[in-house]
Amino acid sequence: MIAQLCSAQRGASMQLTRKTLIRRFAVYLATAALAVTGATVQAAPAKAAGTCEHFAAIDMGKYWINNNVWGRNSGSGWQCIWDNWLSGNSIGWGTSYGWSGSSYSVKSYSAAILGWHWGWRRSGTGLPVQLSANRSVNTGWNYSVRHSGGAMNVAYDLWLHPMSNPSYNNNPSDEVMIWPYRLNGAGPAGTRQATVSLAGANWDLYRGWIDAGNGTGWNVFSFVRTSNTTSVTLNLRDFLNHLRSRGWVSGSKYLTSVQAGAEVFTGNGQVDTNSFYANVS
């Protein structure tokens, strides 16, 4: 069957709680064969270690792994996380998943978290840092992806606040996403503004708004790599400074969180982080 890729973007929003993130993400319509209606979701595999409990956490040094299934109500399925190793500031971990349901909404975002996530869990993170201080935030991430079915992406998620010590009830003012990898039409919120060159690669830059309800929300900026890669070495300061140079983000804001994980719309798969680190200097 010949299928066409639709350029229209769709979004989904959900009510915010302490354990869920409100976001609207877009996904381009993929081929009819990738439609989730009638999709088969494989059973959760047995793991020697780890957890499949919703929103469970695994502490790994200054990081923690969050089994975040914030969009689960738009479909059905499962997600598991496990830790593999910890050495200094570097970690290895993995996630597996199986989701069906709406092809336009993210079901889960299992992620390694450094810093804030509707509250603080681990110490010694080096965060927060004010953007005007121009501190380096060096990160490296090597991973492998096995996926079948609908859309998914691998992404950094950075959170900015106007204050240095936000609590669980302080929503961010800005969200900055960096997508080095995506499959089957996954696309970010907002509209494309430009293609920029950073960290030796080209990125499509999107700008949008997340409606959190009750007249509140936050800005969202997404850098989507124009070609997929499974290994990146970045200074996140470069991406933040690019937004500052456009006048979209103020230097008075604080970077409070660096997260790195897999966003899944639908499908079955596994993402293995062979090595990850994020260091503020």
Image (cartoon, rainbow, N blue to C red):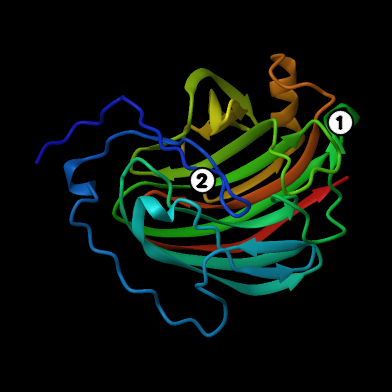
Image coordinates for residue 214, horizontal then vertical, percent: 57, 30
Pointer 1 residue: 134
On the rendered structure, is 96 left or right of 75?
Answer: right
Which mark's residue is nearer the viewer, 2 or 1?
Answer: 1
Pointer 2 residue: 229
* Residue type (three-letter) at the residue carrying disc 1: Asn
Q: Is residue 55 above or below residue 185?
A: below
Which residue in the rendered view is the most extreme toward the left? 1
Tag 2, which secondary structure? loop
170 or 234: nearer the viewer = 170
On the rendered structure, is 16 left or right of 255?
Answer: left
Tag 1, which secondary structure? loop
Which residue in the rendered view is the most extreme toward the bottom? 48
Question: Image quadrant for the C terminus?
Answer: top right
Name the image quarter holding residue 180.
Answer: top right
Q: Residue at x 37, y 58 (%)?
A: 147
Image coordinates for residue 278, horizontal then vertical, percent: 75, 51
Q: Distance of mark 2 from mark 1, alpha carbons? A: 27 Å
Q: Are marks 2 and 1 in contact (CB under 8 Å)?
A: no
Question: Dot 2: within a 10 Å radius of its alpha carbon, few (fewer than 14), some, or many (20 or more) residues?
Answer: some
